[in-house]
C-alpha cells in the first residue's frame, strides 16, 4: 500500500489595505491625528478622550496605547512615519480640564479651557430615539465654523487649525453618501466661548409619509391583517400618512440617488441629530511651537504686555505724585 505523504500547505498572508496618504480627488495630504492624555485623567475625561478619538475617525488611532512614561517626543517620533499631522491632548489641572490642539512637528499649539462637556453616552440617553449606525464613522466629518470672521488674528489661526484638521472636500465631486457627520464650532464674541457640537446627517424625502418611508428602508412586509385595502396602509389616519412638517430652508435638491428613498432631482429634508461629544471651550493661549515657543496670543495677556501695563501704571502714579507735591 502506498504511503501517503503529509503535504504542508502554505498560505500567503494577505496584507491589510493601507489608507491613502493623499486624497485622490483634491490631491491634498490627508490629515491624521493622535488623541492622547498628558498626565492623569479622571474617568469622565478618559471617556471624553475616547469620544474624541471616535469623532476623528477614520484618520486617527482609535486604539492608541499610552504609558505614563511616554513623553511628547515619543509621540512625535511615531507621528512622522505614520503621517500624523495633528495632536489633540487632554489634561487636567486643579482648576479645570484643558484641550490642546497642535500641528506637528513645529506647531502652532492652541490651548482651550473646557468649561463644560457632555459625553456621547449622556447625549444618547437624553434622546428618545438615539441614532448611531456602525457605518457612520467610515468617513471623516464635515467642518462648519460660525462667528470666527471678526478679523482678529487669534480667531484666524483657530479657523485655519480646525479647517486643516479634517480632510478637504471638493463640492463638485464629493459623494453625498460620504457626508454623514458634521462638526459645528460656533464662536460667541460676547462670552468668547466656542460651542463644539457633533451631529449625524440624514436625509428624508419631502412629501413622503413616515409609514411608507419606513417600509422602504426596513425591507419588512407590513402587517395588513386588519386593513380592508392596501390604500388603507397609506392613508389611514394616525399612522403618519401626512408628510412631516419640513422647513423649506432645510431642504435640498439631490444631484444623484442616495439610498432607496432619496432620489435624484427630488427635494429631501436635511435632519441633524446630535451624537456627541459636546464641549464649551475658551481659547486661552496660542504658542508658536509644539507646546513651546513664543506666545502669540494669551487671554490673560502676555508677560511683555503685563510689564508694559505695569510700567504705564507706575508712570501715571509718578505723575500724580509730582502733581500732589506741587
Image (cartoon, helix red, strand yellow):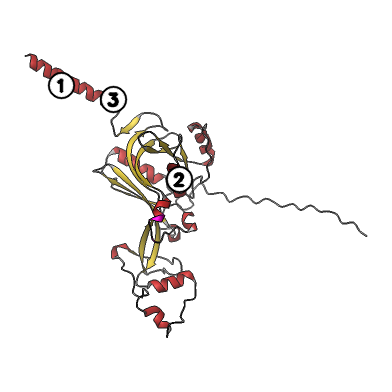
Write down the residue under mark 2. 47
Q: Is residue 286 magenta?
A: no
Residue 159 location (% of width, % of height) = 34, 44
Q: Which residues are magenta?
A: 124-128
Contact (Cβ within 8 Å) of mark 1 with mark 2: no
The percent position of residue 142, horizontal first and vertical second, equals 40, 52
- State which quadrant residue 307 falls in: top left
The residue lying toward the viewer, choosing from 171 and 77, is 77
For residue 166, side relative to residue 145 (left or right)? right
- Kindly identify which residue carries mark 1: 316
Please identify the quadrant where the N terminus is shown. bottom right
Mark positioned earlier in the residue sequence (1 or 2): 2
Q: Secondary structure at mark 2?
A: helix
Secondary structure mostly taken by the magenta-highlighted segment of the chain: loop
Q: Residue at x 65, y 51 (%)?
A: 14
Which residue is at the front of the view, 172 or 55? 55
- Nearest to viewer (mark 3 / mark 2): 2
Residue wearing tag 3? 304
Give the CA separation, mark 3 to mark 1: 18 Å
Q: Is residue 4 visible?
A: yes
Q: Quadrant of the image for the C terminus? A: top left
Amino acid at each position: 500500500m502506498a504511503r501517503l505523504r503529509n503535504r504542508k500547505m502554505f498560505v500567503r498572508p494577505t496584507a491589510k489595505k493601507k489608507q491613502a496618504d493623499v486624497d485622490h480627488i483634491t490631491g491634498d495630504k490627508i490629515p491624521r491625528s493622535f488623541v492622547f492624555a498628558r498626565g492623569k485623567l479622571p474617568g469622565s475625561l478618559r471617556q471624553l478622550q475616547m469620544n474624541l478619538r471616535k469623532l476623528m475617525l477614520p484618520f486617527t488611532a482609535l486604539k492608541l496605547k499610552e504609558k505614563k512614561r511616554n513623553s511628547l517626543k515619543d509621540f512625535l517620533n511615531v507621528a512622522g512615519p505614520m503621517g500624523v499631522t495633528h495632536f489633540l491632548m487632554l489634561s487636567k489641572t486643579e482648576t479645570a480640564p484643558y484641550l490642546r490642539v497642535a500641528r506637528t512637528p513645529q506647531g502652532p499649539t492652541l490651548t482651550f479651557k473646557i468649561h463644560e462637556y457632555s459625553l456621547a453616552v449622556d447625549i444618547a440617553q437624553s434622546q428618545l430615539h438615539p441614532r448611531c449606525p456602525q457605518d457612520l464613522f467610515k468617513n471623516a466629518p464635515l467642518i462648519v465654523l460660525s462667528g470666527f470672521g471678526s478679523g482678529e488674528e487669534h480667531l484666524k489661526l483657530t479657523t485655519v487649525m480646525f479647517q486643516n484638521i479634517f480632510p478637504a472636500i471638493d463640492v463638485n465631486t464629493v459623494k453625498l453618501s460620504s457626508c454623514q457627520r458634521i462638526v459645528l464650532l460656533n464662536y460667541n464674541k460676547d462670552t468668547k466661548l466656542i460651542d463644539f457640537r457633533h451631529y449625524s446627517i440624514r436625509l428624508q424625502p419631502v412629501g413622503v409619509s413616515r409609514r411608507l418611508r419606513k417600509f422602504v428602508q426596513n425591507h419588512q412586509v407590513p402587517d395588513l391583517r386588519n386593513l380592508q385595502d392596501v390604500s388603507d396602509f397609506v392613508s389611514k389616519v394616525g399612522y403618519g400618512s401626512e408628510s412631516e412638517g419640513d422647513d423649506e430652508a432645510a431642504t435640498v435638491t439631490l444631484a444623484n440617488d442616495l439610498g432607496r428613498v432619496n432620489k435624484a432631482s427630488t427635494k429631501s429634508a436635511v435632519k441633524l441629530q446630535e451624537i456627541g461629544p459636546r464641549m464649551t471651550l475658551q481659547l486661552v493661549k496660542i504658542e508658536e511651537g509644539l507646546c513651546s515657543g513664543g506666545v502669540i496670543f494669551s487671554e490673560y495677556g502676555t508677560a511683555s504686555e503685563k510689564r508694559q501695563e505695569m510700567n504705564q501704571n507706575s508712570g501715571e502714579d509718578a505723575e500724580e505724585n509730582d502733581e500732589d507735591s506741587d
